[in-house]
Image (cartoon, grey):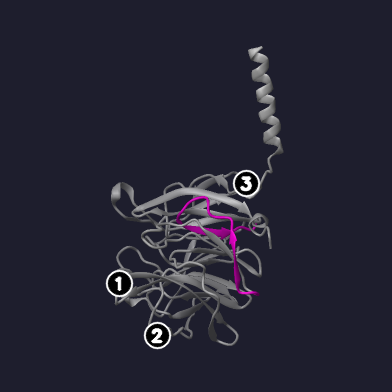
Amino acid sequence: MKPLCQLLTTLIKIVLTSMQPVSAETWESIAPLPEPNAGFAAGWVKGKLVIAGGTNWPEGVKRWLDKTWVYDPGTNQWTAGPDLPHPLAYGAGASDGQQLWIAGGTDGKQARKEVLALTKDLGWTHVGTMNQKVAFAGGALVEGKLWTYGGTPDPDDWKQVTTALRSVSMNGKPSEENALRREGMGIGLPAVVGLGGKLYAFTGAWMSAEKGQVQNSPEVAVYDVASKSWSKVTPYPVSARGVAAVALDDQHVYLAGGYGTDEEGFLDAAWIYDVRTQQYRKALPLPIKALTCLVKGGDGQVYALGGEDQKKHRSAACFRIPVTELLKGE
């Protein structure tokens, strides 16, 4: 009787399991980065994911990286690409599906002002120079230009973070645009997205002279390229820095992760922002709590790549999920 009872129990479990609702809302784990990394530039280039530069902490020592890695979704493998001309992290990066651009950043010693482009033959080219060095700025492509917002000319001095907005043409010609004036308070590590001729800058961090430490901001500012004007919209639901953002379509932006207060630590919470209604709705969280990097691929997937998941620590974990799954409920 005992084997029969065990069989019946197993069958009952199978039936009950099959009756449970199955949710497709889940991140799929893919091949990890070749090494833990955060602060790199990333984009979709000719059907493949590309990451370049970044930092990690082997044996407790911060290391600045000059490697480029290319991920093939078809084989689920990372392969080495061309090295950057020097170590580089925390630059303003953006991709149009054909090329990846990086403006500024830091090599671990100083901020940079070069504009680099990964060309169609997967080689890095120095395409121009910005008017000023900057690191920890946000970047996005709008109206055929790479725009950088915020950041600091000195990576070690957050008192110098600015609200400067700059644009660089695809041939590397720089220009200075209007700076968003906010009572002298600059912003670093903003999440920047370009949509519909506008630049959306979410959250970030600034140095509080009163408290003597870096503070997070929930503020969201929008720059209209046509009118050359700034406006403020509904603040982000939480104050955070290092939030990752990606446009899902021409109306919705997925924002996730980052770092909250020291009590909150690293975050996995996510929201979808509707640019038309200026409202947020709670969205599927990240699979890890981290300052990760989000990239929308030409294959209809959103990729979450590595990131800072603990202080003085980096993750190599990578995930993906269909854009349609993140948009469920819209």
Circle 1 residue: 157
| Quadrant in the picture for residue 109 | bottom left
Amino acid, disc 2 = Glu
Q: Kindly check if marks 3 and 2 are in contact, taking CB atoms under 8 A apart as contact.
A: no
Disc 3, SS: loop
Disc 2, SS: loop
Residue 163 x, y percent position in the rendering: 43, 80
Residue 217 x, y percent position in the rendering: 43, 72
- Decide which of tag 3 and tag 2 comes sooner along the chain: 3
What is the spatial separation of the Cα atoms under label 3 and label 1, in whole angstroms?
Answer: 43 Å
Q: Which mark is residue 183?
A: 2
- Can residue 77 be seen from the camera position used here? yes
Give me the residue at 35% from left, 55% from top.
Answer: 311
Q: Is residue 241 above or below residue 11?
A: below
Foreground of the two, 182 or 12: 12
What is the spatial separation of the Cα atoms under label 3 and label 2, in whole angstroms?
Answer: 50 Å
Amino acid, disc 1 = Asp
Circle 3 residue: 74
Q: Which residues are magenta?
A: 276-298
Q: Is residue 308 above or below residue 161?
A: above
Amino acid, disc 3 = Gly
Foreground of the two, 148 or 216: 216
Q: Which mark is residue 135?
A: none
Q: Quadrant of the N terminus?
A: top right
> Marks 1 and 2: which is nearer the front?
2
